[in-house]
Every structure is written in C-alpha cells, then in structure tokens.
Image (tube, rainbow, N blue to C red):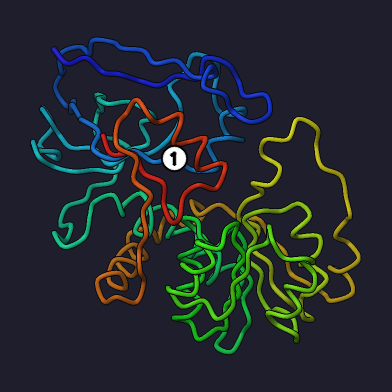
C-alpha cells in the first residue's frame, strides 16, 4: 500500500503565513478501482494566488491547493499507462488517486528541457503572460510595456513575449540581482523599486514618453503611481495584487478614476482560464519559443517535499527568480 504525505492548512492565514499555519499529515491510500490511476508527485508549484485563494476556496484542514507534475505509478485506466506524466491540480501531496478527469497529459515532452517547465513558462504562468499581453493589453509593435514583479514566474515571461512582439519593455524588481537578470533576458530598462529615490522618477526616466501597456502583478502604491504615466488610450492588464495579499487591514487610495478618465485608459482584470479552449494551442507556441531560444527560463528549485511551506513563504517574500518549484 502507498502512504501519501500532504501539507494541510491547519489555520487560515492572518497576515503573512507562518510555519504553524501548516500541518503535515500522512494517510494510506486505498486500492485502485477500475478507471483509477495512482500518481506520484515529481514537481510541485508554489504561486502567489495560493495566498488569497486559500481563504476563499479552502476550509481549515484541507490539503493546500496547487498544481504539480506527477507520474503514473499504477493504472487501471488505459488513457494513463504507467510512466505517463500529467499536470494535476491535486494540491500539496506526494501521491494521489485520480479517476483521470481534469488532468493535462504531457504526452511528448522534449527531453532537452525539464518537465518542471509545465508548471512555469509552458504552463499556467506562461499562459497568464500570453493572454494578458495579447488579449488584454493587445500589444502592438512599437508599444512601451511596463511590467512589475518582472523577475517572477509570470513577469519574466511577459517581458520576453513583449520583446517577441516588437515592444520596448521596462521591468521593476526587488533586488539588484533580479534587475541584472532582467537585462540578461532582454528587458530594455529595469530598476530596483526598493532602492530608487522616487518610483515616479524611475518610471519617467525609463520611458520619458510614458507607457502604452502596463502588466500589473502588484497593485498598491506602485500602480497608483504608474497609472499617472500611462499614455492616452493605454491598456492595463490586472494580473495580481501581491502587495496587499498579506495585509490585515485593506489598503486605501489614492484612487484610479482620475488618471483612467483623463487618459481614457482600458483596465481589465483577468484569469488565464478564460481562454481554456485555446490552452493546448498556446502551450505549443510557448514550448516552441522555448526550444528556439526565444524565451529563456529560470527556475528556483527547492529540493524536498518537507520544505514546501518554507518555499511558499520564500516566494511571497520575493526570494525566487523565475518560477518557484519544489522537487520531490
């Protein structure tokens, strides 16, 4: 019999997550029924969305939400023979049984790149970057694109896709090491928002004429300042608001109506799953661009399932460059 280890939400987060908010449990999995598949985790993902969604989607005691790349150990389902790899939204667990529904097969993965990229550039973060840029921002060659949290799993792909689209790209990140990384992967301008004397001046210096598109992963004060530097008819994709995820008291203004009205801005929040009908099409595009070297991939790998809470909290502190992944 197989025993599965799982990280559960012991207590809903109040402010920044703590180690004591998590509990590691172990259960014995039952024998497979016809149609069932037993999976073992290979790579697990930690992402910013887990922080706010844990409050709305989970009860205390539930397995922490999240996706993983998993391998078939045993199967009574012909669609998933032993050795097959999938992406599954099965949470923070080392093993799980599935009836085969709601899984994404990885049928012909190139050997030259790691399967962990199916949790990053060739997965949800890559899809988020693609649809936010091309469907919400509707970038055009010659646009100037601003990206914050630009060295993260989504932001780093956003910048590279914008360059493929013929845009000038400006990125903001939280360390000099991250700024150097952004320059390395092709950002035209990049700055450390923690060390600049004035965020307003840093944004204006990076693009004196303003910005056509703004891919917002952060919200808060950064966005309040950035909105005033948008060009007329600028487009803003609201992907995340990580600056406020751990607040115990909701943030208050400044408010957006003034700059949105004066510059006739288009601003829309989005979640990548809106375009699920195009998922496979876009994943193939992203995979091809990775193989062609048009998109460079950085991963922050943590080894050991027992380190998942620490990896999650580290990601929320911005310790990762690129996608944060746990290798079991």
Identify the secondary structure beneath mark 1. loop
| Quadrant occupied by the N terminus | top left
- Quickly name the residue at label 1: 46
- Horizontal relation, residue 90 to residue 240: left or right: left
What residue sits 45% from the left and 19% below the top? Answer: 8
Q: Residue at x 56, y 41 (%)?
A: 316
Question: Residue 223: where, in percent of width, then height?
Answer: 75, 60
The C terminus appears in which quarter of the rendering? top left
Q: Position of residue 32 (x, y in %)?
A: 15, 18
Residue at x 46% of width, y 78% of height:
186
Viewer-side residue, 94 vs 185? 185
Please determine whether, in this image, residue 261 is positioned above or below residue 153.
below
Q: Is residue 50 left or right of residue 322?
A: right
Residue 195 placement: quadrant: bottom right
Q: Position of residue 87 (x, y in %)?
A: 29, 43
Up/down of 250 relative to 11, above or below: below
80 or 213, which is in the foreground?
A: 213
116 above or below 306?
below
Q: Looking at the rendering, which quadrant does residue 261 occupy? A: bottom right
Which of these two is toward me, 215 or 97?
215
């Amino acid at each position: 019999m197989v025993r599965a280890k799982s990280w559960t939400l012991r207590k809903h987060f109040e402010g920044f997550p703590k180690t004591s908010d998590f509990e590691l449990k172990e259960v014995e999995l039952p024998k497979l029924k016809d149609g069932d598949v037993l999976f073992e985790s290979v790579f697990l993902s930690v992402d910013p969305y887990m922080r706010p969604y844990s409050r709305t989607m989970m009860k205390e005691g539930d397995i922490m939400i999240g996706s993983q790349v998993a391998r078939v150990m045993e199967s009574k389902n012909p669609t998933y023979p032993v050795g097959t790899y999938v992406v599954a939204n099965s949470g923070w667990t080392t093993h799980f049984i599935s009836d085969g529904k709601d899984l994404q097969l990885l049928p012909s993965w190139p050997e030259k790149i790691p399967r962990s990229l199916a949790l990053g550039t060739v997965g949800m973060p890559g899809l988020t970057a693609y649809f936010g840029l091309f469907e919400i921002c509707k970038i055009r060659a010659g646009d100037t694109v601003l990206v914050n949290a630009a060295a993260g799993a989504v932001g780093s792909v956003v910048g590279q896709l914008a360059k493929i689209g013929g845009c000038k790209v400006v990125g903001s990140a939280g360390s000099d090491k991250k700024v150097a990384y952004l320059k390395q992967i092709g950002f035209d301008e990049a700055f450390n928002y923690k060390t600049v004397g004035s965020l307003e001046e840093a944004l204006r210096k990076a693009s004196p004429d303003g910005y056509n598109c703004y891919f917002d992963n952060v919200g808060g004060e950064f966005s309040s300042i950035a909105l005033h530097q948008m060009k007329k008819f600028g487009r803003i994709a609201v992907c995340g608001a990580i600056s406020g995820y751990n607040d115990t008291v909701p943030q208050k203004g400044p408010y957006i109506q003034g700059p949105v009205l004066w510059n006739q801005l288009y601003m829309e929040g989005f979640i990548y799953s809106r375009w699920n009908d195009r998922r496979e099409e876009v994943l193939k595009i992203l995979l091809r661009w990775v193989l062609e070297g048009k998109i460079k991939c950085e991963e922050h790998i943590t080894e050991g399932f027992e380190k998942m809470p620490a990896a999650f909290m580290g990601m929320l502190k911005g310790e990762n460059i690129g996608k944060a992944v746990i290798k079991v």
